Image: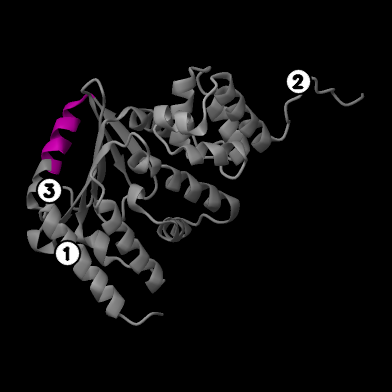
Amino acid sequence: MPPRRVITGRSQEPRKRYAEELKRLRLERRLSYRALGAVAGWDGSLFSKMEKGETLGGPEVVQALETYYGVQKDMLVALWELAAGDHTQFRAKYRKYFELEAEAVSVWHHAAGVMPGLFQTKNYARTLMETGLLEGDALARQVKARLGRKERLTGANPFGYRAVLSEAVLRRPMPNHAHWQEQLEHLLEMGDRRNVTIQVVPYSAGLYALSSTDVTFLRLKDGRVAVWLETSFSGSLIEGTTDVDLLQLRYDRARDLALSPEDSREFIMRLLEEAKCEPST
């Protein structure tokens, strides 16, 4: 049987097909990269790189584009999955979380032992994911996806973000000393953003209800609050239950125990100075 003839004129290579579709949708609406960035909430240069095939973009970027363009649900998601070569990226619960995060007007997070994903440097994210036995292309894709989420903090329409960090987050260094200094410096830079607030719960505060729990509160445009509970292995989404109220109360108490944003910044700066004084390995 002769090979099937391709008559669409579109690339059959997944990554190129994905980039072509992104470009087609943008040009149909006669949008510049800057204009698309303004309405979608990310820097326009990201969309340029996505259309050139230099990056796939993070999963939440794809969700936001689907919503803005009003295309068939999960069309771009499917193309993204094919381009990434990983069909497990958008398992239902994670997909729902990304949809809610794209709608959020503010996000509150408590980190028990690991730097929040929105604050992680590339080296921190890679090192952390390597501990989860990721490697090769899968590792590279996951790192890119995580870094892509930062656009929600630094793009044209960022949400408000409050992070309450257990001191344990700041006392668990990376194997590479220079990379750890880089991470602390980056944390300070993120804390300088007007839409970001960072508070540290010191060890001296003692035990508290969230001391072993990573939790994220997504405050949506319609006033609803969704909660994401996460472990190093998986996560779960909680909506519209009394559990949300209970977790909110625990978060409020953790925040009450935390240092002020100003004192938290000084705390991080002291740790950075200590790190600079330590010999490099």
The outermost residue toward the bottom is 279
Measure how far apart labels 1 and 2 are at the Cα level.
59 Å
Measure how far apart labels 3 and 1 are at the Cα level.
17 Å
Circle 3: residue type: Ala
The outermost residue toward the right is 1
- Over which residues does the magenta segment extend? 240-251
Residue at position x 24%, y 75% in the image:
274
Q: Secondary structure at mark 1?
A: helix
Whether the magenta-drawn stretch holds residue 204 is answered as no
Image quarter where the C terminus lies is bottom left
Along the viewing direction, whichever of 150 and 97 lies nearer the viewer: 150
Mark 1 or mark 2: whose residue is earlier in sequence: 2
Whether residues under marks 3 and 2 lie with C-beta atoms below 8 angstroms apart, the answer is: no
Please give the label number shown on residue 267. 1
Height in image: 179 above or below 40?
Answer: below
Whether residues under marks 3 and 1 lie with C-beta atoms below 8 angstroms apart, the answer is: no
Judged by depth in the image, the label closer to the viewer, 3 or 1, is 1
Horizontal relation, residue 211 to residue 87: left or right: left
Residue 13 x, y percent position in the rendering: 71, 35
Q: Provide the residue designation for mark 3.
A: 254
Measure how far apart labels 3 and 2 are at the Cα level.
57 Å
Circle 2: residue type: Thr
Q: Secondary structure at mark 2?
A: loop
Whether the magenta-drawn stretch holds residue 246 is answered as yes
